[in-house]
Amino acid sequence: MDENEAKALAAGPLGENMAKFPLLFAKTVFFGPRPSPERAADINSGTVTLADFGEGPLAITCQHVISCYRERRKVEDDMIFQIGHVSLDPLEQLTGKDEHLDIATIRLTDVQVQEITSTHKIGSCVFRPKVWPSPDPEEGEFIAFGGFPGKLRTVE
């Protein structure tokens, strides 16, 4: 297949479906003080990817999300952290973090996964690769990324 054929496929229904595919494994996360009529909402948000590499389900996010939650929790009361509609304490379930790579992994229970994935198409699946680590992509292969860019979540 030449480059023009590949671009035509990517611009058509195949490309549209491939671009939506990563969103099957992505879920929004938000955290901040529990909403109250006494104060304005002050919520941070981010994205997790739901994955299982053979040792149980994980929510994978950026380390800066966990760091921000940790810092806010030190000074604010009644903090919540939710993945979709599921509340949890990410610090209690944190299994790994790397500030240089800006990545953090949160171990999820089967019950949490069932609740997180039970509604809507976005975030309805846990990615379970057949082989891990994945082989490097070949030049010309289609790659798609998904998430919820912060700029698009900002209300101005």
Image (tube, grey):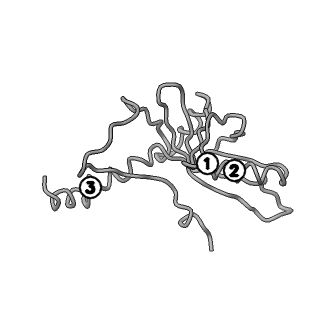
- Pointer 3 or 1: first along the chain: 3
Query: Would you call the spot at circle 3 few (<14 residues within 10 Å), some (14-19), or many (20 or more)?
Result: few
Tell me the quarter of the picture where residue 106 sits. Answer: top right
Amino acid type, residue under disc 2 in the picture: Ser
> What residue is shown with label 3?
13
> What residue is shown with label 1?
99
Question: Relative to 7, does residue 65 appear above or below in the rendering?
Answer: above
User: In the image shown, does 68 or 80 lie closer to the viewer?
Assistant: 68
**Residue 67, disc:** 2
Q: Secondary structure at mark 1?
A: loop
Question: Relative to 108, does residue 148 appear above or below in the rendering?
Answer: below
Viewed as shown, does residue 92 lie left or right of 56? right
Amino acid type, residue under disc 3 in the picture: Pro
Amino acid type, residue under disc 1 in the picture: Glu
User: In the image shown, does 73 or 123 lie closer to the viewer?
Assistant: 73
The quarter of the picture where the C terminus appears is: bottom right
**x then y, percent, for residue 62:** 58, 49
Alpha-carbon span between mark 3 and mark 1: 38 Å
User: In the image shown, does 50 or 72 lie closer to the viewer?
Assistant: 72
Q: Secondary structure at mark 3?
A: helix
Query: Would you call the spot at circle 2 few (<14 residues within 10 Å), some (14-19), or many (20 or more)?
Result: some
